[in-house]
Amino acid sequence: MADDKKVSDTETNADCGVCDRPVRKIGVLCGLCEGWFHVGCEKLSKDDYEKLTELGDKSHWFCKTCRSKFKGMKKEIQVLREDNKALKNRLEAVEKRMDDLQNDIVRDIKEKVIEEIREDEEQERRKSNLVIYNLPEPEGTNAEEVGDIEEAVCQQLFEQEIKVQEVAVVSVKRLGKPREREVRPRPNANAAEPGVADKPKPRPLLVKLIDAKTKWTILKNCKNLKYTQNDIFKYVSVTPDMTYKQRQEDKRLRDELRRRKGMGETNLYISKGDQAINENGRMVLEMMEENDLIRINDTPMCNGTYAWSRGNQRSAIDLILANREAYNYVQEMFIDEQKELYDLSDHNLIKLKLKLNERKPNFNKGKLIQKDFYKTDKDSMDKYVDELRQNLERAEIADLSQLNMTITNCANKTLKSTYQKRTDPKVEIKEKPWMNGQIRREIKKRRELNRRKRKAQSEEDKNNLHNAFLAQKKKTQQMIKREITEYEKKVTMQIKSKNMSKNMWEHIHKLMGTEENKEEAFSRWNEGGHKLQEDEAVKQLAEFWTGIYQKHLNRVDEAWNLDMRQDYLDKYYDTPTDNIIIHEHTYHEVLREHLDMVFEMTSGKEIQSMPMPELTESMVTPT
């Protein structure tokens, strides 16, 4: 029998799945576990066996064990069918809900778009309108005459009080229904007596202008209303005509304005319903809009908000603006709100990190200049001393001027040398304050390596010298950075300890080594602590010292006059010049106060000539 048959009437090679004996003649194959079974072991009737034989591959037979398993699987399949049906129902419900949500979203978007369109149309209709409050209403029944009167009053308000000329008013209209007079009882009167009818509060007046520019010009100049002397306009206020949405936004901004003022910020106002800023901020926003500038403070690259702080007050007053091209080079911005880097000003330090392209070298070498210097090495000094000794032995030195001349000539001959330097004569070269001798020597070594590299003949020598040059360059840069850091720390400590009242830019110039040579301002103060002008200070100074000198009688003419001066000169010129003796002399007390160094000269001791000086190497220095 072939293995693919499901029934057998001959001997098979398989054992029965029930009795484990070979299935020799009549047997059936289970379609699930693929095991052979005796017909008797499975209690399969003859009719069923014959029917299975007739059907062949079109039928499936399962053993008892597999049929028992099928019963449990059938229950599980039934459960799966029920779950599948429930999931199908839920999926249909979800799809229906999604359709409903999609319809709701479309409807909401449509309503939102329609609302925005209506809002834009309403704002466009109101963009040139103003609303004037507390403007008295003229009395009259003729609407045309009342309108003409109110238009004339508006022109007077704009031109005379707000100071805006040539305002074109299109129309005026009172908002709301006319208000009736309110009757209040008379004070200290009986209940039967009639009350007093108060004049109703004036309704707001809607004024339509020719354009929006005129409207904002009027609003900007409304500050002039506080100076009005006209009783009609004493309590008048002017506002833009806003929609409900604009009024809600205006309320939010005013709440923000009160909150920020409560935090200590000052000089704030609401600009065109935009945001709470000050006058300088308004100018900055206009400049940014006109020049297409970007405020780096508002970008994600900025770390920090407040650039100024004093006590509990804070403000974002300092800004960094950049155009579109410069903005691409900005990497990072940092505001030192905690004053960790710089604490000498109420403005916080702002650091900006840029990524710039490498600057192209400038091949304009400038002009060559020559400078003289005197050599101080031992060999040069030995030559100088020998030359000076020989000159002193040969020459006859008569006075000190000849000695100086000899020293100078010898120094120029043996020590003086000249070097050339290429520089721009228009630029004054000033050595950096952090420069020292060690850095100069390292820079000299770096230049020498670069010079040798350019003159090297072989590629190997060039590579070796190039590597040595790069190492020396890195070493020099590290030394310079270290010295700059130490110099900045030193100067910062000096600024903190000596003068905290200087301006911030003076500190920055000092740290950068670009301190300007400006004379400090000189202020004059009197003893009462009041600052004086120059003329007033000179006048008070003269009055003060005049009062001191006039306390004593001035008798200087009794001790020193023209006659006494002539006698003194005659006595001086008549004295022989070869013998002079100096004597102390007592003059009049008034004269001694002013001429305490005057002495009398008489003939006496002979003057000796100056002896030849003995010079040594340590005593001689070049001039």
Image (cartoon, helix red, strand yellow):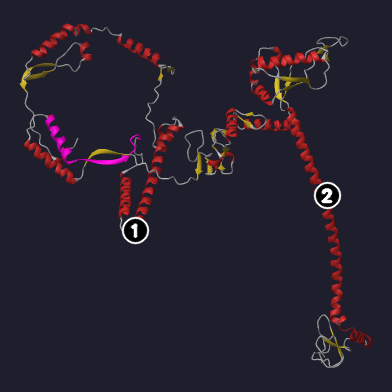
The residue nearer to you, when weighing 11 against 604, is: 11
Q: Is residue 598 visible?
A: yes
Q: Residues within 10 Å of mark 1 (few under 14, many from 20)?
A: few
Looking at the rendered image, the quarter that the N terminus falls into is bottom right
Residue 389 lies in quadrant? top left
Amino acid tagged 2 = Asp
Q: Secondary structure at mark 1?
A: helix
Amino acid tagged 1 = Asn
The residue nearer to you, when weighing 595 against 565, is: 565
Instruction: Please name the residue shown 75% across and 28% down the image.
Output: 125
Left or right of 256 on screen, residue 109:
right
Left or right of 430 on screen, residue 218:
right
Count of all numbered marks drawn on residues in the image: 2
The residue nearer to you, when weighing 517 against 585, is: 517
Across and down, in percent, residue 557 comes to 21, 6
Left or right of 547 on screen, residue 187:
right
Residue 464's disc is: 1
Residue 361's disc is: none
Residue 201 lies in quadrant? top right
The answer to whether 254 is drawn above or below residue 90 in the figure is above
The answer to whether 412 is drawn above or below residue 590 in the figure is below
Q: Which residues are magenta?
A: 401-427
Residue 435 lies in quadrant? top left
The answer to whether 482 is drawn above or below residue 495 in the figure is below
Residue 100's disc is: 2
Q: CA distance from mark 2 to mark 1?
A: 79 Å
Looking at the rendered image, the quarter that the C terminus falls into is top left
Is residue 414 rendered magenta in the image? yes
Left or right of 495 on screen, residue 263:
right
Instruction: Please name the residue shown 10% across and 29% down the image.
Output: 399
